[in-house]
Amino acid sequence: MSSKGVRQVALLRGVNIAGKGARVAMADLRKLFEGLGFRDVRTLLNSGNVVFSAPTGRRADVISRIEKALASKLQVTCPVTVLSADEVAAAVRENPFSNVATNLSLLLIVTPLAPSGLQLLQPLLKERWAPEAFALGSRVAYLWCAGGVAKSPLWAAVERSLERSGTARNIATMTKLMAACAETLTVGNDVRRIRTP
């Protein structure tokens, strides 16, 4: 762990989705996280993904601070999920559909707000989803939406089971987030690697 804290990823649900949801400028989101005292903040893409460093502490407290600041400073109310860099790496590493997914944008990783949310998805393992596919990992669920996400019966079932409280990213985005957690930053004249725990 660095003196600045451990690398974490915040995933905001429903941000900047075409035609619906909250609109948030990524520059405003970075400023908000920095204002909360988080370090080494960077956003990835335009869909509410924030990589940051924070002192070790209760995750629920970090999430609460972020959600309150979003509401008070940006007038955005949305669920926030925070994963450690290790959890992001495990989600990518445990992907069971790497040999099946022909389009990375259709292979979703769904993160329930709390790890206990995976229990709500257990019954879906008993269903037949072909040509789609479903699996559970240690912290996330994997959805191969072969015919597209918008028309996916599997995606609809996962949303119902989690009562629309989880958040999804495709495997390509999660892989980029994993890389961002291990990036090097130039600070003054020094180049340093931001270390994961």
Image (spheres, rainbow, N blue to C red):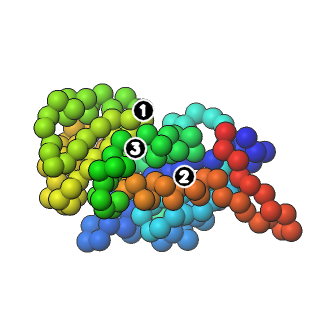
Q: Residues within 10 Å of mark 3 (few under 14, many from 20)?
A: many
Point out the frontmost of discs 2 and 3.
Answer: 3
Is 162 positioned to the left or the right of 44 in the image?
left
- The amino acid sitting under disc 1 is Ser
Point out the frontmost of discs 3 and 1.
Answer: 3
Give the residue number, with chain letter if any, for mark 2. 178
Residue shown at 33%/46% (left/top)? 97
Q: How many marks?
A: 3
Q: Position of residue 57 (x, y in %)?
A: 63, 35
- The amino acid sitting under disc 3 is Asn
Q: Is residue 171 above or below residue 42?
A: above
Residue shown at 35%/59% (left/top)? 104
Q: Residues within 10 Å of mark 2 (few under 14, many from 20)?
A: many
Q: Is residue 127 above or below residue 103?
A: above
Q: Secondary structure at mark 3?
A: loop
Asked if disc 2 and disc 3 are in contact, CB closer than 8 Å, the reply is no
